Image: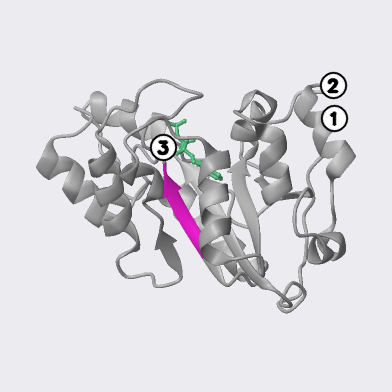
Amino acid sequence: MWCLVTDISANSLKKRKLVAVMGGTFDPVHHGHLRSALELKQLLNLDQLRLLPCHQPTHRGVPRTQAEQRLQMLRLAVADEPSLYIDDREIRLDQPSYSVYSLQSLKAELGDSVTLFWVLGVDSFASFTRWHRWQEILQLANLIILTRPGFTLGENTPEQKLWQANRADCAELEKADCGKIYALQLPSQLEISATFIRDQLQQGCSVRYLLPDAVLNYIQQQQLYG
Ligand code: ATP
């Protein structure tokens, strides 16, 4: 079993300013994203958790909706939740989205006293060594990998070897500015995906309770995913 269930004490990571970034397509945002983000922020006692929608993803197909619509759904989803912050820097750049450039831009903006964490589900981490300049991502941030029901990391893959070489426990993470990989099983473990939501909508089925009502209302108003 490669993942860890942790019981992190609330103040264990409280020395530097800690900012985590969860990148994604968010097509659409759902409770799997939102609950994971909130639990992570609380567990690691982060100063900020940013949801960062990509403009044009580079590791997957074209999103079903416009970047501005995905951004609007995110804004609606967190409108009543001050602890989650939407970072629209990739949407503002009308070009393919590369995580390494977003992290560089964040580092320049927030300064060296901030420790950055790049948050991703294990399904996304499974292709990490094919990401553009992935080694530089590890020079800018620590990685936090979230387990996801139905997904495991393949044995002997480059990503599994990378994780084994750089894995950290909470105490090590506390000391590292970058380069460490922390695998975490959050309490809620919601088996929700945007793919499932899009499929359900395509079939004319209800997706209520899988995502916030405000997002569902927007999908209906804009007639998305039909
Ligand atoms: P799709 O089904 O279209 O691939 P998705 O539901 O995986 O979409 P993304 O926008 O691709 O959503 O995900 C953004 C990030 O959030 C990724 O790192 C992904 O692994 C993670 N993530 C998505 N859903 C969950 C979930 N239910 N639990 C934990 N992490 C998740």
Say above or below: 45 vs 92: below
Q: Position of residue 195 (x, y in %)?
A: 40, 29
State whether label 3 is within 8 Å of ligand 1: yes
Closest to the observer: 211 or 19?
Answer: 19
As measured in the structure, the alpha-carbon distance from the residue carrying label 3 to the one carrying label 2 is: 28 Å
Residue where numbered disc 1 is placed: 161
Q: Are marks 1 and 2 in contact (CB under 8 Å)?
A: yes
Q: Disc 2 on helix, strand or loop?
A: loop
> Image quadrant of residue 112?
bottom right
The answer to which image quadrant residue 34 occupies is: bottom left
| Bounds of the magenta segment | 49-53
- Considering only order in the chain, which callout, 2 or 1, is on the residue closer to the N terminus? 2
Q: Residues within 10 Å of mark 2 (few under 14, many from 20)?
A: few
Mark 1–mark 3 distance (CA, rounded to whole Å):
26 Å
Q: Dot 3: what SS?
A: loop
Q: Magenta region, mostly helix, strand or loop?
A: strand
Residue 132 lies within the magenta run? no
Sequence-wise, the earlier of marks 1 and 3 is 3
The residue under label 2 is 156
Q: Answer whether labels 1 and 3 touch (C-beta < 8 Å).
A: no
Give 214 or 125, whichever is nearer the viewer: 125
Residue drawn at 42 percent across, 63 percent down: 85
Give the image location of residue 104, x and y in percent: 57, 49
Which residue matches tag 3? 25
Disc 1 marks which amino acid? Lys
Of marks 1 and 2, the one in the foreground: 1
Q: What percent of the width, then of the height, locates residue 179?
A: 78, 48
Residue 92 versus residue 77 in the image, above or below: above
Q: Is residue 143 visible?
A: no
